[in-house]
Image (cartoon, coloured by chain):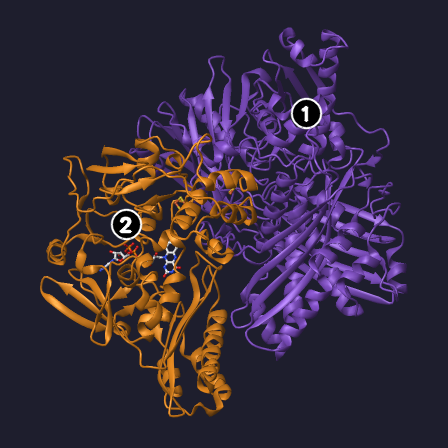
């Protein structure tokens, strides 16, 4: 496949297999070896580069996705003679040890400072959380970013602008066919032909391809389908395009204000480089019981709009999953949009994730919860939990137990709800945790949520 | 910290000399150079932990271009020389751990290699496997030798039984620690290139060029000149590239010799985690006797390490563990027994700390348990028992004046962290209830720098310096830069010894054809031991230059630049050192470094997620050659210790590691790291260059016990294990509350 991209300000025309990883294109075709492979599965960030202004892990990104885009790598950032302030600060603060993680960490720092000139310490830690460093303990790295924030970014000349509409040109030797349609109609038609792998952000697929579990022959990429992007108000609901990257959702004021539990869940997905690419459509369609953005959708009573050439239908988010990694979505359907009714006034929302660590973590248990107190009783109680069964589930029995109960004795109610929640989940032991832990923590999180409602009650 | 004058190179916080290459992406690690002529090599591995190897064969689909090597085809002795020579390069008739190589394959490209690997059939007859420590201790199998005991050490002092009988309080506890994966960011890799003279050259990501050199000479029967080992810039090692590269290099070498092409073996992450060595899991039974004032009278300790299926470095790891298990405390009577036993699991190996983190965890947990029983503050109990100058360790080493700094680091860390105040604040915070609990824990550790006892005398490390025509001096040592800063610190030491700016010193990339054997880059010995040899070499060179240029010359090195001068120094043993290796008795280490840490944590009692909030660490390291680099070592090592203490869990199933990916073996992110506050205390040691002692491993020891202590403080329950996972904590919290 012929692709064209701007790399470090230079226009590059390349002939590459469409699903070759951007990391390999940079290293093998362009000789840019600054980006490293530390894991090949999006975990370590050693391969991180900046794509159209956002940090991405180049090991997860298929080459065709860079077509028409602007890529910055460590080589384009600065030289010892003309360094970027981030580079100077890393040197000055002693933030470098073995150096293998450093190109990725420097790019992550640059991406942060480009967006936020004076980030706080917690923000810096959050922004770097997808870049694992085994040597430094991060202290000097954080200090380096604080130091770099004090100096203005080096003017790097006129940055080329991306040309997202640029058409892709297949080559005779291509083993994979790639469709990157600009409209939903065209996307549905491509899908209707069958044998197609849909790509949202490829953050799940990239891992599966690396493990050789999936080997797509025909790819339908949603990144340029206008109808599938963005958040808009439709009556009493927010309608979220299924292919909107998490990074856009996080910057959306309506989502932050009206759907704080979804906002919190999205913020907990992976780390910034994963959020730059990952989508709700992928999180849903992938069907993992540990998907973090899904419990809020169930708790908020969202409906999913599924679209195919045959038409459109809506299913409730909690009716979408039928079993472990199984959904009601037909092969010819796309998850097009997520319709989230605006919660009733006074609804308290919460999202909690007990993960394997504080970022870049798979949930051992997650819980999204919504409820309000109306006329002294609990109303609109919805609790959804992940990683406690084959699918994300609504804790229906616990919800029923709480709905309409007087809010007078929340502590007692919280105890009862905790016991009910622990009883209604069916978790397993696996490499990340135990069934007992998952059951107990589900109960604890439910209890904490219910007990916390009184803060609102007294207000 | 002494202020660096501009003349002084030692003590100057200069940026590391390799920093710019690393921050600009210019540094080329092993995978970064294209090698179109190189073939690719891989191992065929046993999926079973214990089996009779019936056959290894090619099917018809095996590509003609590829080569297959099994044990009978090996062009060399089937062994990888380490402490012993029990580890075969390829399993010959019995497989003793899952992932053990049974054959090697090389092919000109990736596709052919894949096809070749798919066309090898391995027939195994499964045998019962011994997978846990208790079975191994019962002598089941046996996996190794007659009784599975790969090594055993004892320390006996005084009359422990009488001391226990007279004790006011006896405290008992059993402490377990788990595997730890190094997870250096750059996976292991080597490239072997056959030489026209029948020898072979190795380029690789490694710590110990001469270990590999030796293993290659032993197995291939080659003389030293025909084996060349070079180090490529190394993306982290932490001990993981101490022993394993000998195996990988030999595999690549035999393939290269067979196919006649360079052979690259560069691991992907999954193979690296699945097959390379880990920190030894441990179990320590600890009994301590105290008098009425809380003074230690005696300890009785039984330390067991899981060696895995072969010897590798386990006896040495055990020896160090045994020598550190009584901690920095004054103990008149002791009975210490250490064993490392074999199981049908992948061999465990070197990891920063080398047995001490396991020992320190047990010792420090026991001190905290004792403090609870005695009703004393943990810091106070330590203060009452710590060793001071003139005290004698249980293994017979008496601390000479200026050697002990336990008191110093403990006092400093308590003050710097505001320990007493922070503990009171945590109590007040916890009294309010809610989901979060705070806790503050303290720990006191030590680490012996350099090889144990007379180890350095036996190694007789050498270092050379060469005066180049441009007036600069090149350092020729086999110590490698792996992130720890050797390529900056050694030049600083040499510059100081020569009286020149650091800019006039070069560090030669380790290469056995160009540098002498300074010993391996391990045991926190590079700065202290190799640095000192280097100082001797520099002084010789300076003398030669002065002799050449005359006494009045202001810059004799510049004047003698074209004279082709060089100098080599050999390790000078200290005549006062007395060490009895057979009885494990005497002056175990010449330079002790000391550390005290205070950890502050926040625990969410709903999920038992532990967040280290702040970590204050005071280390006494003789002289900080480069304070910025020292602080970086402390922070990085401490985080590895903290994470081993609660996050890093490696599970095994049927003798195989389950967590063999970065997404399942969890190392800390920037959000999992606390804010660090590090203080370097300096009591110059007469044994190290300009007073410097070892530092690399010391910080690894304090993280886990400090964290465990803080968790105990936060939750008011006891912690016996590393990692103490949220799953364990939640269970114990329930038990305590029931
Ligand atoms: C390092 C790392 C960390 C991660 N951390 C988290 C985490 O903390 N929490 C979490 O929940 N997930 C996590 N993930 C998983 C992943 O990022 C999310 O599931 C993400 O939402 C997937 O979205 P995507 O667009 O990238 O999916 P893709 O990989 O593009 O697709 C995933 C699946 O969905 C299908 N698909 C995608 N979009 C659509 C659509 N619109 N209609 C129909 N089918 C579609 C694809 O065909 C594929 O089967 C992590 C992944 C990585 C690599
Ligand atoms: S290589 Fe680790 S995230 Fe890409
Ligand atoms: S500097 Fe070595 S991994 Fe970060």
Left or right: B47, with B174 as reference point: left
Q: Relative to residue B685, is residue B566 depicted above or below?
A: above
Q: Which quadrant holds the N terminus of chain B?
A: top right
Image position, residue B220 (x, y; %): 54, 22
Left or right: B727, with B291 as reference point: left
Asked if the beta carbon under badge 2 is closer than 8 A to the nearest atom of ligand 1, the reply is yes
Q: Colour of chain A?
A: orange
Residue B138: image quadrant is bottom right
Residue located at (31% from left, 81% from top) = A344
Q: How many numbered markers are drawn?
A: 2
Q: Secondary structure at mark 1?
A: helix
Q: Which quadrant holds the C terminus of chain B?
A: bottom right
Could you classify mark 1 by the number of other residues whose Cα lies within 10 Å: few (under 14), some (14-19), or many (20 or more)? many
Q: Colour of chain B?
A: purple
Residue B6: image quadrant is top right
Q: Chain of mark 2?
A: A
Q: Secondary structure at mark 2?
A: loop
Q: Relative to residue B508, is residue A218 depicted above or below?
A: below
Discs 2 and 1 lie in a common subunit = no
């Amino acid at each position: 496949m012929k692709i064209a991209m701007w790399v470090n300000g230079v226009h590059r025309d390349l002939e590459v297999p469409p699903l070759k990883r951007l990391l390999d294109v940079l290293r093998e075709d362009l000789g840019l070896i600054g980006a490293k492979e530390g894991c090949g599965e999006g975990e370590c960030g050693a391969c991180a580069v900046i794509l159209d202004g956002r940090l991405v892990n180049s090991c997860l990104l298929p080459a065709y996705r860079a077509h028409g885009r602007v890529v910055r790598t460590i080589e384009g950032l600065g030289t010892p003679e003309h360094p970027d302030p981030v580079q100077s600060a890393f040197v000055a603060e002693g933030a470098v040890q073995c150096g293998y993680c450093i190109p990725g960490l420097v790019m992550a720092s640059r991406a942060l400072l480009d967006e936020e000139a004076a980030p706080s310490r917690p923000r810096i830690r959050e922004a770097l959380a997808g870049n694992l460093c085994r040597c430094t303990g991060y202290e000097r790295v954080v200090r380096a970013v604080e130091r770099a924030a004090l100096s203005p970014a080096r003017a790097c000349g006129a940055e080329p602008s991306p040309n997202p509409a640029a058409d892709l040109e297949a080559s005779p030797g291509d083993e994979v066919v790639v469709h990157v349609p600009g409209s939903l109609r065209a996307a549905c038609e491509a899908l209707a032909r069958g044998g197609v792998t849909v790509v949202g952000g490829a953050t799940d697929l990239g891992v599966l391809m690396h493990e050789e579990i999936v080997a797509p022959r025909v790819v339908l990429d949603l990144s340029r389908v206008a109808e599938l992007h963005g958040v808009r108000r439709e009556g009493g609901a927010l309608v979220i395009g299924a292919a909107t990257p998490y990074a856009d959702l996080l910057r959306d004021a309506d989502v932050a204000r009206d759907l704080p539990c979804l906002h919190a869940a999205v913020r907990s997905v992976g780390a910034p480089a994963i959020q730059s690419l990952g989508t709700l459509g992928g999180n849903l369609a992938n069907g993992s019981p540990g998907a973090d953005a899904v419990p809020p959708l169930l708790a908020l009573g969202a409906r999913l709009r599924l679209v195919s050439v045959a038409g459109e239908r809506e299913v409730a988010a909690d009716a979408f999953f039928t079993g472990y990694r199984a959904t009601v979505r037909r092969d010819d359907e796309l998850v097009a949009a997520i319709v989230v009714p605006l919660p009733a006034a006074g609804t308290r929302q919460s999202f909690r994730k007990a993960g394997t660590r504080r970022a870049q973590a798979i949930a051992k248990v997650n819980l999204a919860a919504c409820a309000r107190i109306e006329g002294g009783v609990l109303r609109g109680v919805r609790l959804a939990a992940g990683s406690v069964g084959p699918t994300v589930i609504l804790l229906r029995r616990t919800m029923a137990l709480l709905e309409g109960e007087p809010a007078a004795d929340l502590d007692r109610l919280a105890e009862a709800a905790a016991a009910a929640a622990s009883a209604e989940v069916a978790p397993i032991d696996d490499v990340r945790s135990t069934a007992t832990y998952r059951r107990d923590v589900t109960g604890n999180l439910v209890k904490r949520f219910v007990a916390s409602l009184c803060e609102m009650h007294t207000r | 910290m002494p202020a660096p004058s501009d003349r002084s190179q030692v003590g100057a916080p200069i940026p590391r000399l390799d920093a710019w290459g690393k921050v600009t992406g210019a540094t080329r690690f092993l995978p970064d150079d294209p090698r179109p002529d190189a073939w690719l090599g891989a191992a065929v591995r046993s999926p079973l932990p214990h089996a009779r190897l019936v056959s290894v064969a090619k099917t018809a689909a095996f590509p003609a271009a590829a080569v297959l090597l099994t044990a009978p085809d090996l062009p060399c002795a089937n062994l990888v020389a380490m402490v012993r020579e029990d580890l075969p390069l390829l399993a010959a008739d019995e497989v003793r751990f899952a992932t053990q190589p049974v054959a090697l394959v090389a092919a000109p490209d990736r596709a052919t290699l894949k096809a070749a690997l798919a066309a090898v059939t391995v027939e195994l007859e499964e045998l019962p496997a011994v997978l846990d420590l208790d079975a191994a201790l019962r002598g089941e199998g046996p996996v190794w030798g007659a009784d599975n005991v790969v090594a055993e050490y004892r320390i006996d002092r005084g009359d422990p039984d009488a001391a226990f009988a007279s004790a006011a309080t006896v405290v008992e506890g059993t402490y377990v620690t788990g595997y730890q994966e190094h997870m250096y960011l750059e996976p292991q890799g080597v490239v072997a290139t056959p030489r026209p003279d029948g020898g072979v050259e190795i380029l690789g990501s490694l710590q110990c060029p001469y270990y590999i050199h030796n293993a290659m000479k032993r197995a291939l029967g080659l003389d030293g000149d025909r084996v060349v080992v070079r180090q490529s810039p190394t993306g982290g090692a932490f001990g993981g590239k101490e022993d394993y590269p000998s195996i990988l290099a030999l595999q690549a070498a035999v393939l290269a010799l067979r196919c006649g092409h360079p052979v690259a073996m560069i691991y992907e992450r999954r193979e690296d985690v699945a097959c390379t060595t880990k920190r030894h899991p441990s179990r320590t039974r600890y009994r301590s006797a105290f008098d009425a004032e809380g003074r230690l009278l005696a300890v009785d300790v039984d330390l067991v390490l899981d060696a895995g299926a072969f010897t590798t470095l386990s006896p040495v790891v055990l020896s160090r563990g045994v020598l550190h298990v009584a901690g920095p405390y004054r103990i008149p009577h002791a009975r210490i027994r250490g064993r490392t036993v074999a199981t049908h699991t992948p061999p465990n190996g070197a990891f920063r700390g080398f047995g001490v983190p396991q020992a320190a965890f047990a010792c420090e947990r026991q001190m905290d348990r004792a403090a609870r029983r005695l009703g004393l503050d943990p810091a106070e109990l330590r203060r009452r028992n710590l060793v001071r100058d003139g005290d004698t360790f249980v293994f017979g080493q008496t601390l000479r004046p200026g050697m002990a700094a336990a008191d110093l680091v403990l006092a400093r860390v308590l003050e710097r962290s505001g320990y007493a105040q922070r503990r009171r604040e945590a109590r007040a915070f916890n009294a309010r209830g809610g989901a979060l609990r705070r806790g503050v824990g303290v720990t006191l550790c030590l680490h012996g720098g350099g090889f144990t006892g007379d180890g350095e005398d036996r190694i007789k490390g050498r270092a050379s310096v060469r005066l180049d025509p441009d007036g600069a001096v090149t350092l020729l040592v086999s110590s490698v830069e792996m992130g720890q800063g050797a390529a900056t610190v050694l030049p600083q030491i040499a510059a100081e010894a020569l009286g020149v700016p650091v800019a006039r010193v070069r560090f030669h990339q380790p290469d056995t054809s160009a540098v002498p054997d300074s010993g391996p880059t391990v045991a926190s010995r590079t700065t202290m031991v190799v640095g000192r040899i280097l100082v001797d070499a520099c002084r010789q060179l300076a003398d030669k230059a002065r002799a050449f240029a005359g006494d009045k010359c202001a810059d004799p090195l510049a004047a003698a630049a074209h004279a082709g001068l060089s100098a080599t120094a050999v390790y000078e043993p200290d005549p006062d050192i007395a060490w009895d290796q057979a009885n494990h008795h005497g002056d175990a280490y010449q330079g002790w470094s000391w550390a005290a840490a205070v950890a502050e944590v926040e625990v969410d009692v709903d999920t038992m997620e532990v967040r280290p909030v702040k970590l204050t660490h005071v280390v006494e390291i003789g002289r900080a050659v480069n304070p910025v680099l020292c602080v970086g070592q402390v922070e990085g090592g401490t985080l590895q210790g903290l994470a081993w203490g609660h996050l890093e869990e490696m599970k095994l199933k049927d003798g195989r590691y389950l967590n063999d990916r970065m997404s399942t073996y969890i190392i800390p992110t920037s959000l999992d790291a606390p804010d660090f506050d590090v203080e370097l205390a300096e009591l110059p040691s007469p044994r190290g260059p300009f007073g410097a002692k070892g530092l690399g491993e010391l910080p690894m020891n304090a993280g886990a016990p400090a964290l465990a202590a803080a968790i105990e403080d936060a939750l008011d329950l006891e912690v016996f294990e590393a990692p103490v996972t949220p799953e364990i904590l939640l269970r114990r919290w329930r038990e305590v509350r029931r």
